[in-house]
Amino acid sequence: MEFGKRILKGAVLRDSIRVEDPVEVQKRREAECEDLIRQARMKSERMMADAFESIRKERE
């Protein structure tokens, strides 16, 4: 029985290790980077809009 458990455990471990295609990994990383850049731009634009709005209110 112990031997059977070890074989089963080994099979589960082997199945849990994912072999990923390097091209797919690269595409996913590029997409994540583009998303982060887009989020940073949106945040920057919001901050600029808020700054301009506060300057406009100060002048009024």
Image (cartoon, helix red, strand yellow):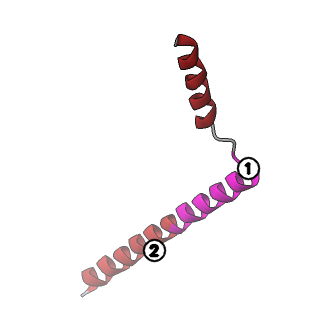
Q: CA distance from mark 1 to mark 2?
A: 36 Å
Q: Residue furthest bottom?
A: 60
Residue 38: percent from the left, percent from the top?
53, 68
Mark identifier at residue 21: 1
Compared with 45, 4 (above or below) is above
Q: Are the two marked residues, 1 and 2, in contact with CB atoms closer than 8 angstroms?
A: no
Give the residue at x 40% y 73%: 46
Q: Vertical placement of 25 versus 52: above or below?
A: above
The residue positioned 64% from the left and 57% from the top of the image is 28
Number of other residues with Cα within 10 Å of mark 2, as a class: few under 14, some 14 to 19, many 20 or more: few
Residue 41, given in percent of the width and then of the height, sits at: 51, 69
Quick check: 32 left or right of 51? Answer: right
Q: Is residue 23 left or right of residue 14?
A: right
Q: Nearer the viewer, residue 36 or 50?
A: 36
Amino acid on which the number 1 mark rests in the picture: Asp
Give the label, 1 or 2, closer to the camera.
Answer: 1
The residue closer to the viewer here, 12 or 48, is 12
Q: Is residue 8 left or right of residue 20?
A: left
Label 1: element kind: loop
Magenta-colored stretch includes residue 19: no
Q: Which mark is residue 45?
A: 2
Q: Which residues are magenta?
A: 20-38
